[in-house]
Amino acid sequence: MESFFVALNAVLPMFIMLFIGFLVRKLKILQDSFLPQLNKIVFNVFFPFLMFNNIYGSDFSSVFSPKLLAFAVIGVFTIYFLSIGFTLLVEKSNYSRGAMIQAIYRSNFVLMGLPIAANIFGKDKLGMTAVLVAVIVPIYNMLAVITLEIFRGQKINVLKILKGIAKNPLIIGSALGLLSVAFNIS
């Protein structure tokens, strides 16, 4: 029964937030025309700050696990390449393939994983989770930029891929967080 309450305490806040979002939409507190702008603000401003804050507030030296990190990175690439193979078999449209590949390999690690880990272990114990976020989320985003460029149906533009990676807000937030930790910037 104790495990049930631990799980409930970990997941319930997420469901409450989803319910609040549902109510906001149902009660038309926000106009549908504002949602694309809100999504843009969240992706370009709030997510990078969240990435930075999660990385910046962590003590990597005491929790770093190279084996876990290697396992996570290998897992992401394995799922990514399997998703490409699967998608090439089942989807004929190149335009749809990029979105389908992303839907298979990407997770909601930042949106769901971090809050659940924080609710289970406490915010002060997110060290290795923050390390994983610092590495995995930029990998997700680099693969997304590459995948969408490859499957957009036009000639592959390597410069556009590199620019997309360099300008990605989540990668920038992670990089700034890592630099702040590495150079002990307070």
Image: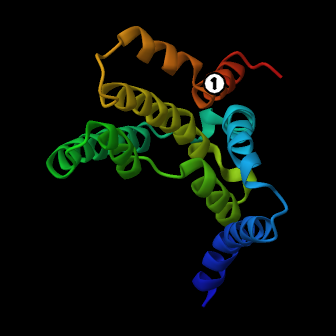
Q: Quadrant of residue 159?
A: top left
* Residue furthest out toward the left: 89
**Residue 184 shown left or right of residue 60 in the figure:** right
Could you tell me residue 167's position as x and y percent? 58, 19
Residue positioned 62% across, 59% down in the render: 117
User: Foreground: 143 or 118?
Assistant: 143
* Residue furthest out toward the bottom: 1
Residue positioned 75% across, 71% down in the render: 26
Residue positioned 74% across, 20% down in the render: 184
Could you tell me residue 143's position as x and y percent? 39, 31
**Residue 68 shown left or right of residue 118 in the figure:** left
Which residue matches tag 1?
Answer: 178
Say few, some or many: other residues with alpha carbon within 10 Å of mark 1 (under 14 / 14 to 19 / 20 or more): many
| Residue 29, above or below 52 | below
Q: Quadrant of residue 75?
A: top left
Quadrant for the C terminus in the image: top right
User: Foreground: 171 or 87?
Assistant: 87
User: Foreground: 2 or 27?
Assistant: 27
Could you tell me residue 4's position as x and y percent? 60, 84
